[in-house]
Amino acid sequence: MSIEQLQIRGFRSVRDLTLPLQQLNVVSGPNGCGKSNLYKAVRLLHEAACGQLALALAEEGGIQKAMWAGGLRQGDRRHDAKRLSLAVQMDDMDYQLEVGFPEPLATSLFNLDPLVKEEHLWMSGHQRRPSACIMQRKNQTAFLHNIDGERIAYPAVLHPEESLFGQLGEPHRYPELSQLRERLRQWRFYHEFAVWPGSPIRAPQIGVRAPVLAHDGSNLAAAWATIVERGHHELLFEVVSEAFPDSEFHVDVQNGRFQMLMSRKGILRPLESAEFSDGTLRFLCLVVALLSPRPPQFMALNEPENSLHEDLLPALARLIAEASQFSQLWITSHSPKLATLIRQHTALNHIELEQIEGETRVVGEAWI
């Protein structure tokens, strides 16, 4: 159920890229080469499955800002310059989403919304033949294969700004489509942890068992305690001890509220999370995210080394390698050292990017 290939066309600095993926993937390159654009493109597939495609694009400035702004190369007929195309090929399914500009309406204020032009879902291994297509959408109509294997018209008019995934009623009638939707929804993305002064992560929070770290890390203490009780706590303490050899971390509970504390050699009282450095909090969040007792099929980390001292990178690299045994990982990084350290523990797919004339390219790939 892992991703075998990712295809991105017409998104920001990406004109046309096809990336074969493995279990552990590290995407690196200089600042401004488009690493974050690839991360955002993958996340758009997740947001589409959650019914949040329009909102995700609006938060990035709208569909107008998401489109490839350059021109097409001579003889390039593979992509319409007015469309954004995302496709993911898994071991058993192949999904493609094409998005374009909305129709200009004088009465509408929603000019940041996208217009879903096409969606397709094929069973993998059939070279996208019509007979293998189990979902075909064009604009606001769609044809699907139901639980009986019959090809039927979807019995509702679709909203043009959202994927079919976000509008799927009676999912039990369309098992393959429902299965893929749930896979995409369960992908996890970690980009920014809320480590600034006054953020929830720095204050006691009501604690309930949390096998999954929140995307902003706000439930760090509860997620830590969950690993201690039900997860790989030996590795948790081992990695943290390697990163902070003079410190110990534990969870303090007062009236049902959880807070991380750090006891440090030479300091007579425990330090509260409000007193932790940004780098310490970020590292703890990464540890808890990667050691989740409920690992996802796919997890993406965007520049996890940010705000971390280089002395923490060996422990982070070991942790990433360990986590890749249970989840397919996408790591975006601007640190060449991190990829080298990870490779000391396990094999990885290292994708190096560059930008040529405003276009994101894979280093060494033939110019088209």
Image (cartoon, rainbow, N blue to C red):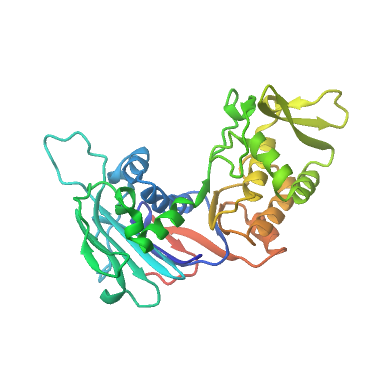
| 289, above or below 266, in the image | below
Q: Residue at x 30, y 41 (%)?
A: 62
Q: Position of residue 199 (x, y in %)?
A: 57, 26
Residue 203 horizontal/vertical position (percent)? 63, 24
Task: Confirm whether residue 357 shows in the render.
Answer: no
* Residue at x 73%, y 52% (from the top left corner): 314
Point 76% across, 26% down: residue: 271
258 and 366: which is toward the camera: 258
* Quadrant of the rendering where the C terminus is positioned: bottom left
Q: How many marks?
A: 0
Residue situated in front as seen by the camera: 367 or 185: 185
Query: Is 299 positioned to the left or the right of 260 in the image?
Result: left
Residue 366 in sight: yes
Q: Quadrant of residue 346?
A: bottom right
Residue 57, image x, y percentages? 34, 43
Going by the image, does 313 lie left or right of 100?
Answer: right
Quadrant of residue 73 within the rendered picture: bottom left
Residue 2 lies, with reference to residue 236, above or below; the image says: below
Q: Is residue 108 above or below residue 92?
A: above
Query: x%, y% of residue 279?
Result: 67, 37
The residue furthest left is: 106
Specify the farthest residue to the front: 148
The residue that appears at 64% across and 39% down in the rendered structure is: 223
> 106 or 366: nearer the eye?
106
Position of 56 with respect to 153 (left or right) is right
